[in-house]
Image (tube, rainbow, N blue to C red):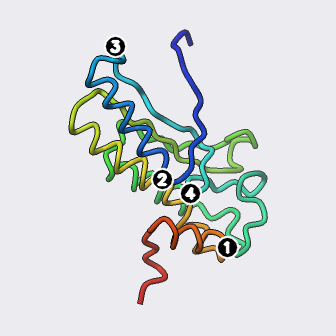
Amino acid sequence: QGLPARICWLGYGERDKAGERFNDMVASGELAAPLAIGRDHLDCGSVASPYRETEAMLDGSDAIADWPLLNAMVNVASGASWVSLHHGGGVGMGRSIHAGQVTVADGTKLAGEKIRRVLTNDPGMGVIRHVDAGYDIAESVAADKGVRVPMTEG
């Protein structure tokens, strides 16, 4: 594909900070061109893949496709530059559905706002999904990181 690319594995609460820093680097001229910050289907709130990523979910929701659709719509509403819905994801057509996103760091204030929203809300969907499925560790992460989980409120 010819373009320089880097992989950066970051957790909840780290992605937005890194994205904002990248945007600042573009704004200052430290980086000479905008950056595309993205991920494909490998995120815990964006996949329904009963043969791989979501196999044997605690609550039996392995194949429920609502989570990837909700993840895609949250990314659209948050300001992602590109949102994709696709299926296959390494297990074959028709056996999974995934959502992906790309957000552009172009050095502008608006890009910084979008980056902060997308790179907070996108991984936050994974925390919410796993709280909903009954994972205690997800409940701990949500409480520790301040992730609002609407279905547990009042």
Query: Cβ–Cβ below 8 Å for labels 3 and 1?
Result: no
Give the Cα distance between marks 1 and 2.
19 Å
**Amino acid type at image mark 3:** Ala
| Residue that carries the numbered disc 4 in the rendered image | 45
Residue situated in front as seen by the camera: 62 or 113: 113
- The reply, left or right, for residue 71 in relation to residue 137 is left
| Residue that carries the numbered disc 2 in the rendered image | 13
- Pointer 4 or 3: first along the chain: 3
| Residue that carries the numbered disc 3 in the rendered image | 32
Give the Cα distance between marks 2 and 3.
26 Å
Crowding near the residue tagged with mark 3, few <14, some 14–19, many ≥20 C-alpha atoms within 10 Å: few
Query: Cβ–Cβ below 8 Å for labels 1 and 4?
Result: no
Crowding near the residue tagged with mark 4, few <14, some 14–19, many ≥20 C-alpha atoms within 10 Å: many
Query: Which of the two marks, 1 or 4, is nearer to us in this view?
Result: 1
**Amino acid type at image mark 4:** Gly
Label placed on residue 135: 1
- Pointer 1 or 4: first along the chain: 4
